[in-house]
Amino acid sequence: MQKLLKSYRHTKAACYLGYVTQAAVNNFAPLLFLIFQDLLGVSLPQLTALIAVNFGVQLGADVFASFFADKIGYRACMVAAHLFAAAGFAGFALLPRIMPPFAGLLIAAILCACGGGLIEVVVSPTVEACPTKNKSAEMSLLHSFYCWGSVAVIALSSLFLLIFGRENWPILAAIWAALPLVNALYFCFVPIAPLNGGGESMPKKSLLKSGSLWLFVALILTAGAAEISMSQWAPAFAERGLGVSKTVGDLAGPCLFAALMGAARVLYSTLGKRLPLKACLFGSSVLCIACYLVAGLASLPALALAGCALCGFSVGILWPGVFSLAAERMPAGGTAMFAILAVAGDLGGLCGPTTVGALSDALGGNLQSGLLVGLIFPVVFTFCILLLSLRERPRR
């Protein structure tokens, strides 16, 4: 079978499915937050803890992968990542029934997060190593599958719950476990090329001393925080904060958010050769600031939902754009650089929504006011991209 899958098209296809798996890891539980509250008695601080654990464990997996991915091999890492994710989805279905519900959800979230963290570190360098010409376009297309995965998870899960009822959510979790199981098998047979063509990567000490690296770290951290803060809390905000039904809220808020984010990434992958990446990143971050203002201040539910959704387009190229810039500016960064950026991105994914959730709880459960706090993340990103442009401006 390995001979039949010798084309790198299969490698990229497996990586695309890997990002769909990570989208399921990050979006499945938030869709069920209010179900967890109503049916399992889980509190808002406990829901915030689930988000923190998800991205905190992903961060730990990123750190682990930065030291061992090259030694273990990308194939083994990807297979293990998908098996962890499958175990996590199965855990969501089973564990709350056989132990205290929050403890069961916590264990399942940890297993999923181990898989999601490993996928995040390894999937980008795996595609970067494939023999393709336009690397930034390939990276943007790769990351778009996270968005299409989010759309699929939100839309199909919402449809399932609408047809079969909220009480059957454990069956839905078991169904989603099949995706990472199948892709784990796929990764056993696809070809995987060495990063940098097998050449030497920059020593970790030299990498950590690079000022450019830390600027990219700040960019990816704030990009992750801006994206995840909105996507994680949009489902609960739409239903509880704006008073719309769960199905309408999920489809008009986070589902449209993910669709527009994917559209931005596909658009850049198509037009990327003609558009300067840094200018696109700057414009996107300014649009993101506007979206957070609308979502956090609008009194009309339709307008607030529009702010949530359009935020997806605004953050679309932030994450893959930073990865592409870093790979272009620091080509010898190797796996360690991708892992450090993944750690920073997951740190943003941890700090952003946790901050929004904690402040919302402090404000009496007002998620709209909490989302307004998220404005700081695109503001800092805008400042950092301007600083990067100034650093790279030729001196006269």
Image (cartoon, helix red, strand yellow):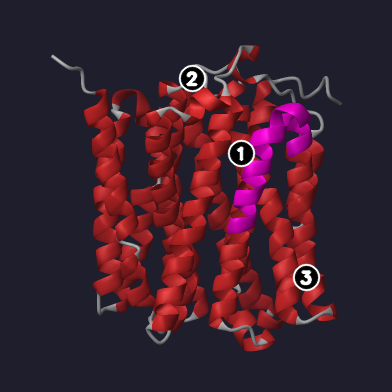
In the rendered structure, does residue 70 fall within the stretch colored magenta?
A: yes
**Mark 1–mark 3 CB contact (< 8 Å):** no
SS class, disc 3: helix
The reply to whether residue 169 is visible in this rendering is yes
Residue at the location (45% across, 22% down)? 330
Per the rendering, the mark at residue 52 is none
In the rendered structure, does residue 13 fall within the stretch colored magenta?
A: no
In the image shown, does 202 or 226 lie closer to the viewer? Answer: 202
Dividing the picture into quadrants, the one containing residue 270 is top left
Q: CA distance from mark 1 to mark 2?
A: 16 Å
Residues shaded magenta: 56-77
- Residue 392 on image: x %, y %: 26, 24
Mark 3 crowd level (few <14, some 14–19, many ≥20, 10 Å Cα)? many
The kind of residue tagged 1 is Val
The reply to whether residue 251 is visible in this rendering is no
Q: Nearer the viewer, mark 1 or mark 3?
A: 1
Residue placed under numbered mark 2 in the picture: 331
Q: Is residue 281 left or right of residue 147?
A: left
SS class, disc 1: helix
- Residue 42 on image: x %, y %: 63, 83
- 373 relative to 338, above or below: below
Q: Main secondary structure of the magenta part?
A: helix
- Residue 369 on image: x %, y %: 33, 76
Per the rendering, the mark at residue 121 is 1
Q: CA distance from mark 1 to mark 3?
A: 27 Å
Residue at the location (50% across, 26% down)? 207
Residue placed under numbered mark 3 in the picture: 93
The kind of residue tagged 3 is Ala
Quadrant in the picture for the C terminus = top left
